[in-house]
Image: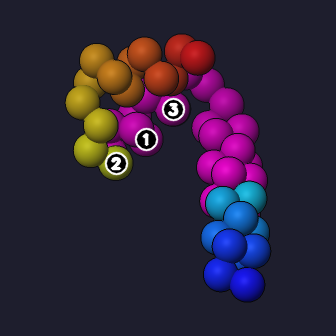
Amino acid sequence: MKNLFLRIDACYRRRLRMVIWKQWKRVMMRYRNLCKFGICKGESWEYANT
């Protein structure tokens, strides 16, 4: 049962990340929001352009 809940939790988290990423439609919006979460500027720029 524990493994089942871990898999369900992983699916929910992945889906939530996808929804948030799609809400941040533009590159600069993604970059700013990633910087707010504490990711360094170089990595934020790299991730925002993917």
- Amino acid on which disc 3 is placed: Met
The magenta span reads 12-36
Judge the density around disc 3: few (<14), some (14-19), many (≥20) Cα neighbours within 10 Å.
some
Tell me the CA gap for discs 3 and 2: 13 Å
Asked where in the image residue 38 lies, by quadrant, the reply is top left
Q: Where is residue 50 in the image (x, y as percent from the top left)?
A: 58, 17
Asked where in the image residue 12 lies, by quadrant, the reply is bottom right
Residue 36 in sight from this viewpoint: yes
- Amino acid on which disc 1 is placed: Asn
Tell me the CA gap for discs 1 and 3: 6 Å
Q: Where is residue 35 in the image (x, y as percent from the top left)?
A: 32, 37
What's the residue at 29%, 37% (across, down)? 39
Residue 28 in sight from this viewpoint: no
**Residue 29's disc number:** 3
Judge the density around disc 2: few (<14), some (14-19), many (≥20) Cα neighbours within 10 Å.
few
Find numbered disc 1 in the image and state the secondary structure of the residue it sits on: helix
The residue indicated by pointer 2 is 37
Q: Predominant secondary structure in magenta?
A: helix
Q: Position of residue 44 (x, y in %)?
A: 37, 26
